[in-house]
Amino acid sequence: MVIDFEVLSNFCQVCHTREKKKLPFTPEWQQAHSPGVTRNFNGTASAMESEAACRLWRRSTTLGLRYTTFVGDGDSSTYKAVKDLNPYDVPVVKEECVNHVSKRLGTRLRKLKKELSTSITTKTGKEVRRSVLGGAGQLTDKVIDTMTSYYGRAVRGDPKKPYSDTNEMSTAIWASYLHAISTDEEPRHHFCPASADSWCFFRRADFNPDEPRRKHSQKPGYFSKIPKKESHPHNKVYTDLTSRDLLSKCLKGRTQNANESLHSKVWQKVAKHKFSGKCRVNYTLQNGHPRATTSAFMTPTSWDTLALGKSPSKSSNLVILDKECDRSFQQSSTGTTGQQKRREKRGRMKVHMVLVFSKYIILH
């Protein structure tokens, strides 16, 4: 259920046009324009997120609610602003979005691969830098994607059997890493699940005597060919990503999927590659969040009756928005010139300045 939202804008088209034409901002004009001004924030675009969150938390008590859980994607500045605000007599606890946490392993491994590089000379005499961890059988992009997928599965766990503490989650993560570096001379499967239907072939063979135990050399682990002296950096990455502080914020398996679902409905009406003012975005949100809230309980016909009623102006406005979006998508799909691309880039930058509510749609 969408409880509240906030749209911030540090841009007003009327004021911008008047300033561009070098017209004076007289007190009489400012007083007459104040009801229709669309600028409701005077700070920078990077400060919008913290300000939007503080506004939502500050007025939550007027709705009879307290938002005691903050689900974030790793950005600590916004949570710090809410924590410093201290809106209640109980602390606001931060929990991580497991979808964003699962991507951290891939980011760290790619960064590590880029840092551990050396200069070599090709056959043509050209000097290039290549990673010492790259190449066949080592830390390729495919291996990084696979290990990131395994890490994500371990963090999410089994919905039917949720983790009871961080030790179980940490064991599952280390099992995927130690399994990947195991060899015939040094098998490391002590963290892998021990059962007849285990995903680990080594532990599965313990419960199936008739099944021959496959050797590691037949299908080497993803990290098994990396020299032992170069395996320490990987170990440090996994140590950082299995810290008790991080995993404790992932135990409940919170995600921002509901927020992203609402955003997809908003961007269907307001194209992201075009500039949209605060009034238009507000109108789209006010008609979009009832659909997101009631879509699981009501038919489209009943929603239209609830949100639009019999007002022809509201219906016609939505039709106009649909046509504008369709026209924009058709133009972008037929190819764009350099001037059009620059204009679209400026539009996207303005949309980013206007719309900073993405992390703070409060859902219950």
Image (cartoon, rainbow, N blue to C red):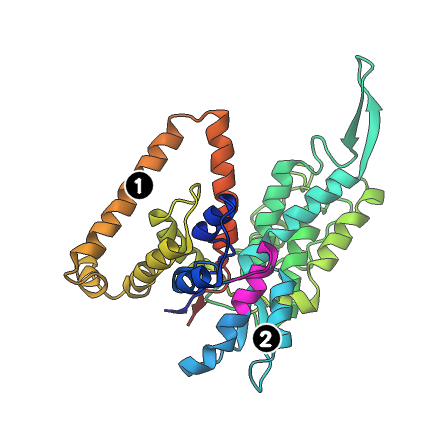
Q: Position of residue 219 (x, y in %)?
A: 64, 38
Distance Cα–Cα, label 1 vs label 2:
42 Å
The boundaries of the magenta stretch are: 41-53
Q: Is residue 207 visible?
A: no
Disc 2 is placed on an element classified as strand
- Residue at horizontal 43 percent and vertical 59 percent from the top: 29
Q: Quadrant of the C terminus?
A: bottom left
Residue 48: say if magenta.
yes
279 left or right, relative to 318: right
The answer to whether 166 is drawn above or below residue 314 in the figure is: below
Q: Main secondary structure of the magenta part?
A: helix
Depth check, front residue: 52 or 197: 52
Depth check, front residue: 76 or 170: 76
94 left or right, relative to 8: right
- The residue under label 1 is 324
Give the residue type at disc 2. Answer: Val
Give the residue type at disc 1. Answer: Glu
Q: Position of residue 107 (x, y in %)?
A: 66, 47
- Residue at horizontal 38 percent and vertical 49 percent from the top: 267
Residue 215, picture quadrant: top right
User: Which mark, by number, is residue 64?
Assistant: none
Q: Position of residue 118 (x, y in %)?
A: 83, 32
User: Which mark, by number, is residue 93?
Assistant: 2
**First of labels 1, 2 by sequence position:** 2
* Nearest-to-viewer mark from 1 and 2: 1
Q: Quadrant of the N terminus?
A: bottom left
Badge 2 local density, few (<14 within 10 Å), some, or many (20+)?
A: few
The answer to whether 62 is drawn above or below residue 281 in the figure is: below
